[in-house]
Image (tube, grey):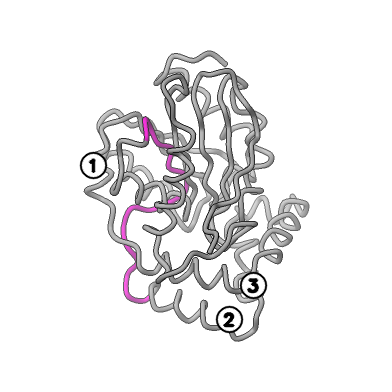
Amino acid sequence: MNESLHVTEYNPGNGAGTLVLLHGFPVDHRMWDACAPFVSAEWHVLGIDLPGLGESPIPEGEPSLDQSARLVAEVIVGLKGPDSGPLICAGLSMGGYVAQAIMRVNPDLLDGVVLLDTRVTADAAGPRENRFKVAAEVERLGSSEPVMGMATATLSEETVEERPDIVEFMQTLIRSQSAAGVAWSQRAMASREDSTEVVKAFAKPTLIIVGEDDTISPPDVMMQIARLVPGARAEVIAHAGHMSPVEQPAAVAEVINAFLVDSFGTEN
């Protein structure tokens, strides 16, 4: 079975390094479409569809984020070379969980990490059980409809009220996902490990980004993550909820660009 993940190249760069973008749930790499063009043109920028979402297949075996991390790592290994420069992984929400899994299993692959609107703790019993229920309902209906509410739940109230185009965009992304892929992702997230100690041990450049109106991974939670890593920088994005790169793409890219310059000496 072909397990290769679908990769989209946003920018070829000029050798400064590579930035790999990992999306949240229940969408795919397209959530980065508005943000990626604002990233420094010096950087090779890629978006990856995680297993079962977008155009990536579902891997064999039990659903797990370690599976996702293994497949993303295979992509990263193919990108690394003596002249490829630093490789940074930026993951939002579920993408942040996958980045943390890579940090745990093979931290030497990464030269830095950007964690956006995510958590480092495992699910508590209630949320974990709810993920399994949602996965079963998605499969029963054969549709992503049971998670369609996330089109608005992941956005700030301001965005929902004033930017119907963003709501429609999120609805389109969610509606395009397969039921099997949504269910696989829910079960993979439900089984994830606590990554607190992993993040503490990651002594490499780290950037934390959170939308000021994120109710899923609130700013106070994200600031706690930032305090785990000595020297980590943290930025709060105004007028954004959980999907900060979708709601405020230029602002998120500006923060990432500043991080790249300060950490790796590139110029915008």
Q: Which mark is residue 200?
A: 1
Q: Amino acid at mark 2?
A: Glu
Q: Which mark is residue 32?
A: none
How far separated are the C-alphas under marks 2 and 1? 37 Å
Q: Which mark is residue 139?
A: 2
The answer to whether one can see residue 201 in this image is yes
Was residue 92 drawn as part of the magenta stretch in this picture? Answer: no
Q: Nearer the viewer, residue 258 or 89?
A: 89
Instruction: Report helix, strand or loop for mark 2.
Output: helix
- For image coordinates 35% across by 42% down, the residue present is 223
Q: Which corner quadrant of the image does residue 115 belong to?
A: top left
Range covered by the magenta-colored residues: 110-126
Instruction: Report helix, strand or loop for mark 1.
Output: helix
Q: Is residue 223 above or below residue 5?
A: above
> Dot 2: within a 10 Å radius of its alpha carbon, few (fewer than 14), some, or many (20 or more) residues?
some
- For image coordinates 43% across by 49% down, the residue present is 96
How far separated are the C-alphas under marks 2 and 3? 9 Å
